[in-house]
Image: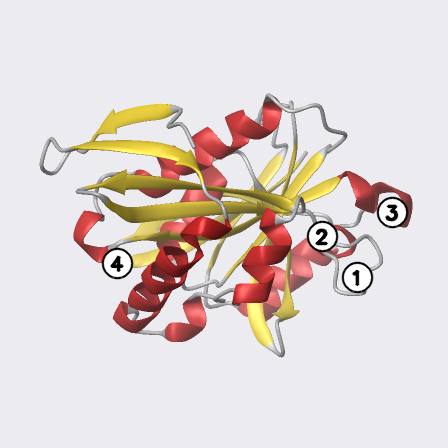
């Protein structure tokens, strides 16, 4: 398949190229995923996908794009179209009605090879994959995803895209996750009438705010500690 984007990495000035991935790339995808998992201090941060889950996406239920450098896959990012009848549907977690669930697409897994971190590849692939989605004839209105509270890089990535935290609950067999959402084709809302900053460690306090209709829209760093800034529209 043809590459649709070429970029240059900040750390070494090497060129990388981006294209859509297919099942022909599955071995390289799984190898990179395993490498990333093995380098994590806390492996609960990442929810790896199985061979069957990747195949589900590539069989028309989503999209995966990958960046290549030095003749190898160095990063990839995926979108997933979830089944509307899923009882764990993220759209339900963020307050959408059942009839709106077919209009939801998920930002799924993203992996970057450890040797190529620091080049903003995760953010660039996010921009590119959403651009690719926009170019398609589709009926999606919302994008949703989950992030482990302690996964600051991923949380920054999602908030930078204009997504907001709408829930904090257990997902994936009891793992605590923020659930984020963004309405597609709309700019991030900046009309916050009230704001409150809470430590990412204050789980119950954040859950209380979220149940009251507050949304988390940015991060605030206090020395070496991060807080989520919540607001009301």
Q: Are marks 2 and 1 in contact (CB under 8 Å)?
A: yes
Q: Are marks 3 and 4 in contact (CB under 8 Å)?
A: no
Q: Which-is-in-front pick, marks 2 and 4?
A: 2
Q: Are marks 2 and 4 in contact (CB under 8 Å)?
A: no
Q: Nearer the viewer, residue 49 or 23?
A: 23
Q: Which-is-in-front pick, marks 1 and 4?
A: 1
Residue drawn at (40%, 63%) of the image: 30
Of callouts 2 and 4, the N-terminal one? 2
Q: Is residue 95 left or right of residue 223?
A: right
Q: Which residue is mark 1?
A: 86
Q: Which residue is mark 2?
A: 82
Q: Is residue 207 above or below residue 156?
A: below
The percent position of residue 186, horizontal first and vertical second, equals 64, 23
Q: Is residue 171 above or below residue 228?
A: below
Q: Is residue 196 above or below residue 171?
A: above
Q: Nearer the viewer, residue 188 or 101?
A: 101
Q: Quadrant of the N terminus?
A: top left
Spatial distance from mark 3 to mark 4, Cα to Cα? 39 Å
Q: Which residue is mark 4?
A: 224
Q: Secondary structure at mark 4?
A: loop
Spatial distance from mark 2 to mark 1, Cα to Cα? 8 Å
Q: Which-is-in-front pick, marks 1 and 3?
A: 1
The percent position of residue 25, horizontal first and vertical second, equals 41, 51
Q: Secondary structure at mark 1?
A: loop
Q: Which-is-in-front pick, marks 3 and 4?
A: 3
Q: Secondary structure at mark 3?
A: loop
Of callouts 1 and 4, the N-terminal one? 1
Q: Which residue is mark 3?
A: 97
Residue drawn at (39%, 60%) of the image: 27
Of callouts 2 and 3, the N-terminal one? 2
Spatial distance from mark 1 to mark 3, Cα to Cα? 13 Å
């Amino acid at each position: 398949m043809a590459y649709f984007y070429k970029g240059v990495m900040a750390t070494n000035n090497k060129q990388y190229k981006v294209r859509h991935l297919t099942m022909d790339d599955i071995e390289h995808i799984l190898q990179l995923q395993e490498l990333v998992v093995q380098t994590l201090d806390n492996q609960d941060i990442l929810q790896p996908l199985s061979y069957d889950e990747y195949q589900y996406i590539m069989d028309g239920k989503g999209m995966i794009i990958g960046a290549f450098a030095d003749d190898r896959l160095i990063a990839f990012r995926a979108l997933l179209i979830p089944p509307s009848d899923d009882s764990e549907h993220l759209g339900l977690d963020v307050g959408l009605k059942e009839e709106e669930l077919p209009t939801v697409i998920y930002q799924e897994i993203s992996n970057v090879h450890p040797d190529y971190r620091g080049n903003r590849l995760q953010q660039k692939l996010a921009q590119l994959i959403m651009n690719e989605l926009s170019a398609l004839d589709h009926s999606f209105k919302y994008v949703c995803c989950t992030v482990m509270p302690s996964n600051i890089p991923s949380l920054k990535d999602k908030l930078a895209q204009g997504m907001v935290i709408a829930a904090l609950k257990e997902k994936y067999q009891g793992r605590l996750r923020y659930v984020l959402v963004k309405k597609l084709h709309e700019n991030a809302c900046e009309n916050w009438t009230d704001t409150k900053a809470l430590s990412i460690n204050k789980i119950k306090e954040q859950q209380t705010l979220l149940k009251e209709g507050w949304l988390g829209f940015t991060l605030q760093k206090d020395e070496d500690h991060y807080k989520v800034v919540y607001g009301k529209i």
